[in-house]
Each structure stands twice: as C-alpha cells, then as structure tokens.
Amino acid sequence: MKHFFSIIGGMGTIATESYVRLINHRVKISKDQDYLNYSLVNDAQVPDRTAYIKDHSKPNFFYDLKDDIEGQDKLHPDFMVMVCNTAHYFYDDLAALTDVPFLHMMRIAVHNFVDNYPNEEKIGLIATEGSIYDHLYADELEKVGKQVELGGPEIQPMVNELIYDNIKEKGVVDKKLYHKILQTMHDKYGCNVVLLGCTELSLAQEKAPDHPYNVIDPQSIIADVSIELALKIRNGMDPKEATKKYLYK
C-alpha cells in the first residue's frame, strides 16, 4: 500500500472508531479511490493509562505501545497518530522509537486553541484523572502562556461517569450529562472554551454536538490534520515536509 499513515488506537475502541468515522466521512470523495490509506492498530489490550499514571505498581502501558509503534515502523508509513490523549504520557519515549513523523495530538489541539481563541487567557479542561494528575494538558498550555481551569470537586466525578460508566462500560453517550458538564464549566467557572482532554469526550461531542458552548476537540482536530497531511503527501509532498508544521516541540 502506497502513501498511508498509521493509527495507534484501541484506547478505547469506541473512541478510535469515532476517529476513523470522522476521517472517512470528512474526506471529499467521488469514488472509492478518494478515501485515505491507513493502517489501524486497535490494541484494546493496552493497560489502563490512568491507573498506571496514578500508581506505578499497576501494569505499565508503555510496552504494549512500544510493540505497536515498532510494528508499524517496519511498514514505513508516512506518519503516525495516536488517538488517545492520556497515552501521550509516553509520547517522547515512543517517538524516539521511530524516524516516522509522529503527531502529538495534545500539542496540535493546544495550538488550535491559541490560533482560534487568541483573546482567551484560560481554557476549561475536562479529562481523565490520569491526564489531570500528571498535568499533561496543563504543561502544554503553560508553554503557550495560557491558564487552565479544572472546575470544582463536582466536575471530575461527572467526567468519570461519562467516560467510564457510560462510554467505556456501556458504549453509550449520556447527552444530558455531557451538556451539564459543559454548562457547569461555563456558567460556574467562567470557561468560554472547554478542552475535551479524552477521546471518549470527543465521542460525546460527535454524538451530542447540539449545545451552545465552545469546545476544543483534539480528536476532531487531529482528524482534519490527518486528512490534510494524507492528501498533501498523496499529491507528491514529502512526508517530513508536510508534517513539520505540526511537529510542535
């Protein structure tokens, strides 16, 4: 297969399915050959990311992802994307395993926020406890001079319920709960923009977008970037030249 990219997914599977659905439906097509070429690794056995980040005695998810990256590296894709926010905890170690351009979904989302909301000094963040605990998004936002608002103690239990009890366990999106979280972040904590720091939350946005709140959706953003890069490379641009604008440090 020529001119393809690799998707490291399965964290979780339903969220990865959402990403694939986005790229398949957003690319402009008139025939089968207009769709993008990609290799999907849906590694559903990757250990829980949040569990390890909060307690290093739990199974380390790095080694599963290492195997996935090294396996895809042998296929020589044009670039790689990992559609799990919390898994970016090991981004630097994983990127060092390959010379293939490896997009950083979180950094791309943060720069999208800066570009599209230049006058906003802070952004609300809802994410897994792992991402919150290790400041994964907070550190990236601090690099660009932005502040993070996490909300009060009532926010994380609602986010956990939406991510784990509803989407991961039952495969459903609780629309009312998702909208309630956004409303609380906006009305109570003054967040004009909310960052969806988990791909399950991106799935919630895909399934329940009918609300008045501004969101930064990393999975939606990386889907658009994937399409942009894949088409440029298909049309003859060198992969490293095409991807360099998105390889933020």
Image (cartoon, helix red, strand yellow):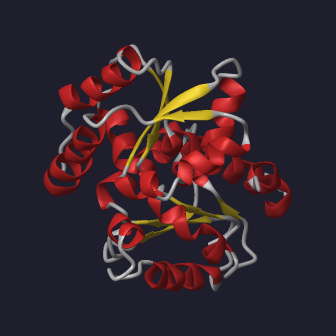
Foreground residue among 236 and 249: 249
Foreground residue among 14 and 122: 122
Tell me if residue 31 comes above or below residue 102 in the rendering: above
Foreground residue among 198 and 32: 198
* Residue at x 67% of width, y 43% of height: 142
Which percent across, then down, holds residue 198? 41, 48
Tell me if residue 11 comes above or below residue 164 in the rendering: below
8 left or right of 115 in image: left
In the rendered image, the quadrant that contains the N terminus is bottom right
* Residue at x 16% of width, y 50% of height: 165
What number of labels is visible? 0
In the rendered image, the quadrant that contains the C terminus is bottom right
Q: Quadrant of residue 100?
A: bottom right
Q: Is residue 81 visible?
A: yes
Which percent across, then down, holds residue 197? 45, 45
Which percent across, then down, holds residue 93? 63, 77
Q: Is residue 225 visible?
A: no
Tell me if residue 220 comes above or below residue 95 in the rendering: above
112 left or right of 71 in image: right
Which percent across, then down, holds residue 144? 73, 39
